[in-house]
Amino acid sequence: MPTFDVSSASPTKVTADLLVLPCFQGRKPGPGVAEAGAALGGDLMDTLKANGLSGKLGETFSFPTFGRLKAKYVLVVGLGPEEKAGPVEVRKAAIKAGRAAAKFATVATTLAQVGDPEASAHALAEGLALGAYRFTRYKERPIDEDSSKASQLKRLIALGNGTGGRAAVKEALRRGQIYADAANWARDLVNTPAKDATPQFLASEARKMAALNGLTCKIWTKGELEKGGFGGILGVGSGSVNEPHLIELGYKGAGSDQPIGLTGKGVTFDSGGLSLKDAANMEWMKADMGGAAAALATMRAIAQLKPKVNVIAAIPSSENMPGGAAIRPGDVLRHRGGKTSEVLNTDAEGRLILADALAYLVEKKPRVIIDSATLTGAAMVALGNDLWAVMGSDRDLIDDLLAAGREVGEPGWELPLWTDYRRNIESTVADVKNVGPRWGGAITAALFLKEFVGEVPWAHLDVAGTAFADTPTDYWPRGATGSPARTIIRYIEGQAEANGSRRATARRRARPTTR
Ligand code: BES
Ligand code: ZN
Ligand code: MN
């Protein structure tokens, strides 16, 4: 884990492998650019111009300093228009810088001097750590020096003291790092092949994480799931030799308050089951536990950030395989709490395991429930790879999640929870059936889940499009993204902040007004 520090050193004097300097649209120099140019004996903005660069967001240009600065290389990164440059832009620039920084040990930057120093320091640390992420666990003999090697990043030096002082900047760096480390952990879990990342593996990773971070943890085994009536988790897992599990985690930061309930789809491999998928792209179905990974990562970050709120997570994990004991089309499963579902397509399995987890969470009387799941190809068809879909029963919850997503640069979009389509999942033999017609597939999937959340305010994030990138983008390499972990972490922190101010208001109101 790299260390992130603050320093008041001048950009020309700081010892580092790479010095990252921001510039704004129209080649307006950002903090440190003029000093670095003077020491280099030139005008960096002229150099950008000669190379056809304008300071657009995410643009990068790097060159060696050959001893004229203490830093060995300079990377100029574009932030876009100066008046619009805030934390979201700093994070994007830092992700770009992080991708370049992964081959260096020490990186110094003035990026945290852009806009609000603390918000920028948070975004800088988060972006740099996200950008420097590499999945190299299975690279035994790297031949390509650049992309196959683990990240070399050891140290980030944020230049400048900020207005709230160095301690405040340092604290913001620490918090940004927590967000990114959590998301990067989720990426590791998602990128790990399904042969290794079994339900048992997810459970043991969760148990280790919980012990390290002071969370309570209970792993439900197959036998316990049978006694507890978790027919969905068991049914989906029955075709696999890898037994299903339910991972229960708890965080207490607010005494006896009602907890926030979390769950996520943990299908460690989705072959489709007897309703077998096509061979094309089936390898990506190792990522079908992206929602579970995000929920686990959220719990890890929350344990480290310690917001004043309670959170419980119940994360179901099964492997969906076509074995001799697999569920068949036409089978009826009995879920936790007693509701039944008719399985007409064994490839609509995510909703079957989430149903049990949602019903279980409802028993805990949470104030809200959030689930995230790589649930439907239909959500991906609707919104592509940049946006997760959200549907739910509570306006405020949905709005808060959308706002949190925008804030962390992981945006979503709402789809309607069109309750008239409930008719499409009416079953003739059970309480509900697990598939409707092809059209509106993301909505019927959400309506299936809704059957199991009772009256609890609930939101469902369909992250089929955002949890992993098949083709790399400017900001994400091929593979897992950690979406939507940072969104949910931000949402929970926001709830704790609102909680705090609500309590303060209540205290003020309760104070006697007589003298
Ligand atoms: N895990 C898939 C959804 C998925 C597809 C996620 C592609 C990421 C990328 C899910 O279990 C599934 O198979 N959904 C089916 C549902 C259908 C059978 C009703 C789908 O979307 O086609
Ligand atoms: Zn699936
Ligand atoms: Mn499926």
Image (cartoon, grey):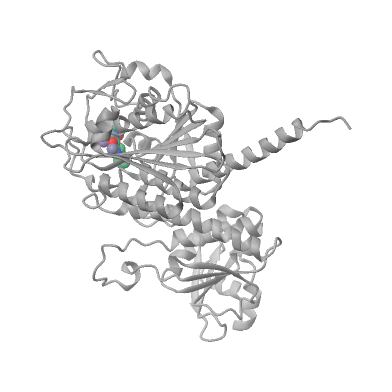
In the rendered image, residue 21, in percent from the top left (x then y), is placed at: 57, 69
Q: Is residue 473 positioned above or below 356 on the image?
A: below
Tell whether 18 sits left or right of 43.
Answer: left
Foreground pick, 88 / 427? 427
Residue 25 in sight in this render: no
Residue at the far right: name it.
Answer: 515
Location of the C terminus (image quadrant): top right
Residue at the far left: name it.
Answer: 324
At a point 44% along the width and 44% down the height, the residue shown is 484
In the rendered image, residue 219, in percent from the top left (x then y), is placed at: 32, 42
Q: Is residue 130 positioned above or below 378 on the image?
A: below
Q: Quadrant of residue 450?
A: top left
Tell whether 391 sits left or right of 12.
Answer: left
Total numbered circles:
0
Tell whether 384 sits left or right of 269.
Answer: right
Residue 455 in sight in this render: yes
Location of the N terminus (image quadrant): bottom left
Q: Please tell me in which quarter of the rendered image ligand 2 is found.
A: top left
At a point 43% along the width and 57% down the height, the residue shown is 474
Q: Is residue 181 positioned above or below 390 on the image?
A: below
At a point 48% along the width and 60% down the height, the residue shown is 95
In the rendered image, residue 62, in percent from the top left (x then y), is placed at: 49, 73
In the rendered image, residue 59, in percent from the top left (x then y), is placed at: 50, 63
At a point 45% along the width and 61% down the height, the residue shown is 131
Residue at the far bottom: name it.
Answer: 67
Foreground pick, 182 / 59? 182
Q: Is residue 242 positioned above or below 36 on the image?
A: above
